[in-house]
Amino acid sequence: MSKEVSKNYWKTIVFTFCLGWIVIWIYRAMLSPIYGEIQGTIGEQTNTAMGLISSCYFFGYTALQIPSGYLVDRFGQKRVLIPGFLVFAAGAFSIATASSLTAIYVGSVLAGVGCGTYYGAAFSLTAQHVPPEKKGIGTAIVNSGSALGMILGMTGSSFVVKQLNLPWQTMVVISAVLIVLLVVWFAIAIKDNMAEKKAEKAAEPVQTVKKEVTESSKGSLFRIGLVSCYLLYFTTCYAYYLIVTWLPSFLESERGISGGLIGVVVSMISVTAVPGALYFAHLSDKKKSQKALIIVGLEIAAFVLVAVSMFAPNAALLSAILLLYGFLGKMAVDPVLISYVSDKADPKNVATTLGMFNFFGMSSSVIAPALTGKIIDATGSGEMGFYIGAVLLLVGTVFFLMCNAKSLKAKHA
């Protein structure tokens, strides 16, 4: 950036966006353990209808992935994040005051749209300021906020509503207040870079810029190697958001686990996610030529654990499986996949490629909650939904392996 940015600014960036994921995931994780209490206010609903609450949020979030990247490029991260998160807070507050399911849907879409400004801003700033030798660890630390936020959202919601017997809206208001406080922190911690962006644009020949955008959009975003990454991330996120959205309800209705224990059991995923992400990010930094193998190994392990979780006869064994899934699952593979996609992307188009990558991944978060709810309504059980998630994960892994087989052979010849 400019000379006035200190050498330690990258540490502020990593802390800020780790904090951001914590707040985002408190919001994302807090509703699923209290679906029953929400229905006590708005009336009994089908599982499909309740699953749509999450799908509405992720619809708004996913729709903003590519546009928000453009806005960040044009106006800078700070000028996009602050108004975006004010919209996020408005969505959360509107859910807290909602008296109907339709109002909750509208609030969820609004929250998703506001939160959709986050990904591009966070990872473009970390890519710009984190030193190259610390990119893997830096990304893993930022992503670890997701795990911490999920723990706080799941357990906090279960404790506040189920143990303290407070209205379910209490947890939503807490979440909204945290979002507003985060906006204040963004205003303090993130430096405005609009002047720098204007200077860069003024220095670039307009025709060259147009030519580069045209050439990169023609082929680089949809090369088969990148498409395999997009599909793999879609299936990885499908399995993960299926678990986050429906596992609490599944445990209560089909495994006899109830009350505050639900949040504790599901949050097992996040207990080992942080060390898993840090370990595999460090491993991928050390063994850069073997990133694809690390990715395949983690995805196969995740497939096995998601499939096996359906056979767990009690909470203790299920907790052990979820601990392993946390260490080897989505949060562990995320920093390695992001690094791998960045390596394969056109250097002129890294931010756009990452936006496309996240767009495909988050598309699954729109589909998985509603589709699984529909399966539960049709069959009376959530097991089929979890099997579908496991099979999709296997398909994505096999496709990724096939598309990257030649490069893997070349590196190990």
Image (cartoon, rainbow, N blue to C red):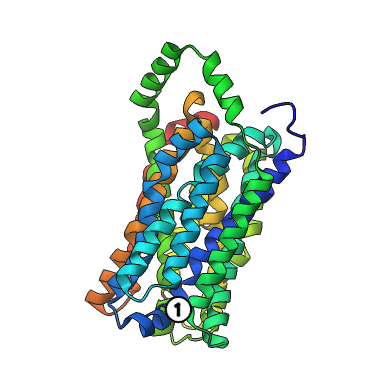
Identify the residue at image location x=51%, y=86%.
259
Position of 189 with respect to 238 (left or right) is right
Residue placed farthest to the left in the image? 378
- Measured along the vertical axis of the image, is residue 192 above or below residue 309? above
Q: Position of residue 256 (x, y in %)?
A: 44, 87
Q: Position of residue 66 (x, y in %)?
A: 40, 39
Q: Which residue is mark 1?
A: 34
Position of 95 with respect to 378 (left or right) is right
Position of 340 with respect to 252 (left or right) is right
For the N terminus, the image quarter is: top right
- Measured along the vertical axis of the image, is residue 274 above or below residue 125? below
Q: Is residue 74 among what the camera can see?
A: yes
- Measured along the vertical axis of the image, is residue 43 above or below residue 329? below
Residue placed farthest to the right in the image? 7
Instruction: Compare residues 247 and 154 and report the one nearer the observer.
Output: 154
Identify the residue at image location x=53%, y=71%.
173
Identify the residue at image location x=52%, y=85%.
162
Instruction: Compare residues 409 and 115 and report the one nearer the observer.
Output: 115
Q: Position of residue 244 (x, y in %)?
A: 46, 67
Q: Which secondary structure lies at badge 1?
A: helix
Tell me which corner region of the image, top left, top right, bottom left or bottom right, holds residue 216.
Answer: top left
Tell me which corner region of the image, top left, top right, bottom left or bottom right, holds residue 103.
Answer: bottom left
Label total for image: 1
Position of 273 with respect to 49 (left or right) is right
Q: Amino acid at mark 1?
A: Ile
- Measured along the vertical axis of the image, is residue 54 above or below residue 193? below
Q: Position of residue 286 (x, y in %)?
A: 67, 39
